[in-house]
Image: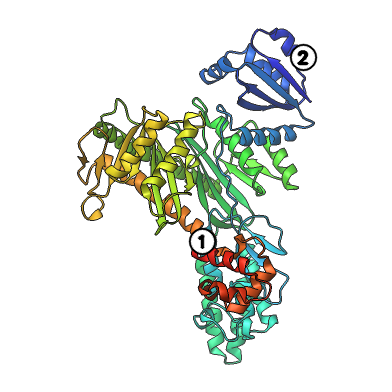
Amino acid sequence: MNEVHDTAGFDVDSFLRSLTGRPGVYRMLDAEGRILYVGKARNLKKRVSSYFRKALDTKTQALMAQVRQVEVTVTHTESEALILESTLIKTHRPRYNILLRDDKSYPYIYISTDQTYPRISLHRGARSGKGRYFGPYPNAHAVRESLHLLQKVFRVRQCEDSFFANRSRPCLQYQIKRCSAPCTGEISPEDYARDLRHTELFLEGRNSEVVEALARRMEAAAERLDYEQAALYRDQIASLRRVQERQYVSGEKGDLDIVAAELRGGVACVQVFFIRAGRNLGNKAFFPRCPAGAGIDELLPAFIAQYYLEHEPPGLILVNRATAEAEWLQAALAERAGRRVEIRSRVRGERARWLEMAVRNAQHAIDARLASRAGMLQRLEALQQVLGLDEPPQRMECFDISHTRGEATVASCVVFNAEGPLKSDYRRFNIEGITPGDDYAALAQALERRYTRLKKGEGRLPDVLFIDGGKGQVAAVRRVLEELQVTEVLLVGVAKGPERRPGWEILHIPGREPVDLPGDSRALHLIQQIRDEAHRFAITGHRQRRARARAESPLEAIPGIGPRRRQQLLRQFGGLRELARAGVEDLSRVKGISRRLAQQIYDAFHGD
């Protein structure tokens, strides 16, 4: 149920009386209908009333000064309100909300179960396959490290099914004792199943059971004088003991996350340690976007709601700060997970030590981020002096062109702001209708398409526009900017300089003498970073486009050539290369290919 209230010139008392005491979500909008803030409430009447009847802090005053409309959605339960709030924040990204920018899917270790010799592998995405999933891990590196260990200790196969099915002899992994070669029958299904079971026990944290089983097998092998096999079991036990010392959290057997939030110097960081089955799988730092004036008391519950409503929560979440919303969050997460979820801040002993370590990691991450920002500011100030700007540039763009002898030409546009690369604003342009290899025309086309949109208001013009190139490229771009009447952007060409060596770049600015910066110039380092990023982005796009183009047969674009005729032609000539060499007469001799169609085929390959 939705109600809408206009805060400009309406009766506040009447408005507040109309509000319900049920749980729900409220949205505050500005004069243009943009959502400024989304909030949840156990009691909508009490929570929304507080914005009109209580003394407000500076941040909330700034918010309310812009609010012209309030929308209210009533929900059945408090959990529904929390889930809806999280969804709306991620969808609309309101300016005054804390926003977690984390859309990636986390990796798991996956063990298939529908095969005689199941495979163990890294998995991302939906967990819909038949088998068992262990994780999540903070990153792919942590998964690969665990897979390497499992391969060394248990020798369960990790190869692709297609590779496994087509082996006639063991591969190199068998020779270096990293696989038991089930592909060629070097191990029985029963023994392989036992190794797989030990792998699962290890991933479940039941390491002692694995060690005991291996010890029994070692003693049995020694009794039958099979000392080589006994030595193998001994080495496995030693490896597991070392892992236990390094990876296992003292006193922990279940799943828990350790979450520490810190906020300093305008930078918010949430550090998460992932503990699964008593094993420390690693940690990850998150940097949510926080509005000015937000505190940890807002940051921590906002992070927990947004993150754990998207990712499966463990049974226990340890936090470094008590939150008044813990009970509410627990109920919502438990409803989502289908089991109990506890959020706890008061801990002792080993757990307190781990929580303290998470706090230190969050503080160090903030220090690094602030140092990086300070370094970026120094580079921007140096660039300001070099370019003669009134203030440090706040937005910079750089264009580059990539092609292979004129094939699949792609132009890139990368964007940097005061914090570094702004990847959400990057763009690529597939260049068409120019003479192959004409970089000037390619640049002109990309600039015209990009800045026509910006002039229409579909984005923001940069303060500085860098072009990877010298006087010729600058002249081509300048003509486009003049045509579009873009006069407020400073154009800078970055030429490679003598011998095209880094550090010898020369800047070409229309109306000025070329600028030759020293190799230790901070301004030059920033320009190189932006130029190199544009180059990388262009090459990546070009390679992708070229791969797509080469994967498509020229026959597919010819009317009248369907799958059956394509197959017939390829069979008749023994492949695409020989077909491309054929003349019109040769092509017309193929059954079903008229002379006119043969001419079209010939033209498709020879560009006539």
Please tell me in which quadrant of the rendered image residue 120 appears: bottom right
Q: Position of residue 405 (x, y in %)?
A: 39, 59
Q: Position of residue 258 (x, y in %)?
A: 56, 46
457 displayed left or right of 162? left
The disc placed on residue 18 is: 2
Which amino acid type is shown beneath numbered disc 1?
A: Ala
Question: Which residue is rendered at x = 41% and y = 47% of the image?
Answer: 442
Residue under pointer 1: 547
Q: Secondary structure at mark 1?
A: helix
Viewer can see residue 395: no
Q: Is residue 594 visible?
A: yes
- Name the secondary structure under disc 2: helix
For residue 575, above or below residue 138: below
Identified at 51% across, 34% down, the residue is 289
The reply to whether the C-beta atoms of the residues labelled 1 and 2 are less than 8 Å apart is no
Asked which quadrant contains residue 310, the reply is: top right
Q: Dot 2, crowdedness within 10 Å: few (<14), some or many (≥20)?
A: few
Identify which residue, 175 or 447, lies in the foreground: 447
Examine the rendered structure and indicate whether residue 583 appears above or below residue 382. below
Q: Which amino acid type corresponds to the residue marked 2 in the rendered image?
A: Ser
At 53% from the left and 73% from the top, the residue drawn is: 583
Where is residue 143? Give x, y as percent. Answer: 55, 61
